[in-house]
Image (cartoon, rainbow, N blue to C red):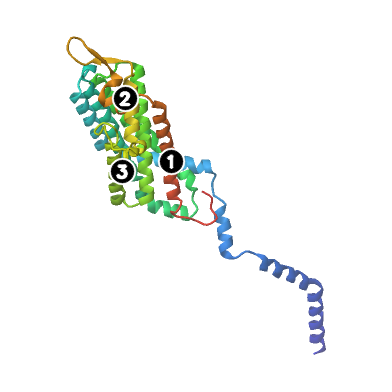
Amino acid sequence: MKEQTLVKKTLIGAYGMKIADKLKEDLQDMSNEPAPDELENKKLAMWPTTWWQQFIVLLQRGVKERKHESFSGLNIAEVLIVAVLSGLLWWKIDISHLQDQIGLLFFTSGFWGFYPLFQAIFTFPRERMMLEKERSSGTYRLSSYFISRITADLPMELILPTVFITITYWMAGLKPTATNFFHTLFVLLFSVLVSQGLGLALGAMVMDLKSATILGSVIMLTFFLAGGYYIQHVPPFIAWIKYMSISHHTYKLLLGSQYKPNETYPCGDHMKTCLIGDFQGIKSVGLNGQVVSAVALAIMLVMYRLIAYLALMRIGVTKNLEN
């Protein structure tokens, strides 16, 4: 009994001298540790890969997915048929048929306003579930996903309009110089990127394919009607729409790629000529202000993509993760 009492006293003394202080420190450290949710958020905040690695992987995935969609047999056949048909309908028209020439330019601006818009509308709604899952798990930043998606789409979106204008331009007999051709091509590709941006913004904001398609149709039809070809005397209270119209600015730039205000065209019998700038279908739109239209399209190019990015920020949000 005495031995047990002696052992007990010895253990208590050893605890007080060697263990008690250290145990108190350990308990204090444990009380200062963050909660499990905070630990999880801190782990998520540390991205598994760099932004550049995420961008490269997502770009490769995007190119593999998009090349089959953009270069499907149906899309290629559609563009080729429209290009050849347009070339045949406007076969070798010369400047004496100025109304027909500007009709071709307006049709080109309209067709390549609608086509990329409806291609882009489907982008984000179809990927919403994947984006929610991967973003919520902290797989990648939204910025790396968004930039890779836009970059992957560039060659896909620009090849088909290049093929279209190459076929139609020379069949229709527009100005046969390299300068005029590449000027027209650049304007067309520029407008395609702007229309694509509008489609991305609508798809990201609405996320319902039927609703987004209807909204896109209404907006583009409004832009199309305000383009300056069908209606040349618009009431002042609604004339402001043309400044927001992709079709109007594209049509104006396409006219500038083919004509100059001081050029002439045959306008009557006995070899009479008139100034192109005075032709009613061109005068209502104007050949001046080309830089203004280019700047307007550039602003739209950035603005629509910014809207799409901001709309995507609400999808698959994970706390403490930077976009």
Vertical arrangement, residue 316 with respect to residue 32, above or below: above
**SS for tag 2?**
helix
Which residue in the rendered view is the most extreme toward the front? 236
x 36%, y 22%: residue: 183
| First of labels 1, 3 by sequence position | 3
Q: Residues within 10 Å of mark 3 (few under 14, many from 20)?
A: few
Would residue 77 be found to the left or right of residue 316 on screen?
left
Rendered view: 231 above or below 27: above
Q: Position of residue 250 (x, y in %)?
A: 34, 31
Q: Amino acid at mark 3?
A: Ile
Sequence-wise first label, 2 or 1: 2
Kindly state the secondary structure of the residue where label 1 is placed.
helix
Q: Which mark is residue 185?
A: none
Residue drawn at 29 percent across, 36 percent down: 226
Q: What's the CA distance linking mark 1 and mark 3?
A: 16 Å
Residue density around tag 1, few if under 14, some if 14–19, many if 20 or more, within 10 Å: some
Is residue 72 among what the camera can see?
A: no
Residue 43 lies in quadrant: bottom right
Sequence-wise, the earlier of marks 2 and 3 is 3
- From the viewer's perspective, tell me whether residue 125 is left or right of residue 168: right
In terms of image quadrants, where is residue 262? top left
Q: Residue at x 35, y 34 (%)?
A: 192
Q: Is residue 9 visible?
A: yes
Q: How far apart are the two marked residues, 2 and 1, measured between alpha carbons?
A: 25 Å
Q: Nearer the viewer, mark 2 or mark 1?
A: 2
The residue that disc 3 covers is 219
Tell whether 80 sits left or right of 253.
left
Q: Which residue is mark 2?
A: 255
Between residue 58 and residue 182, name the one nearer to us.
Answer: 182
Q: Which residue is mark 1?
A: 303
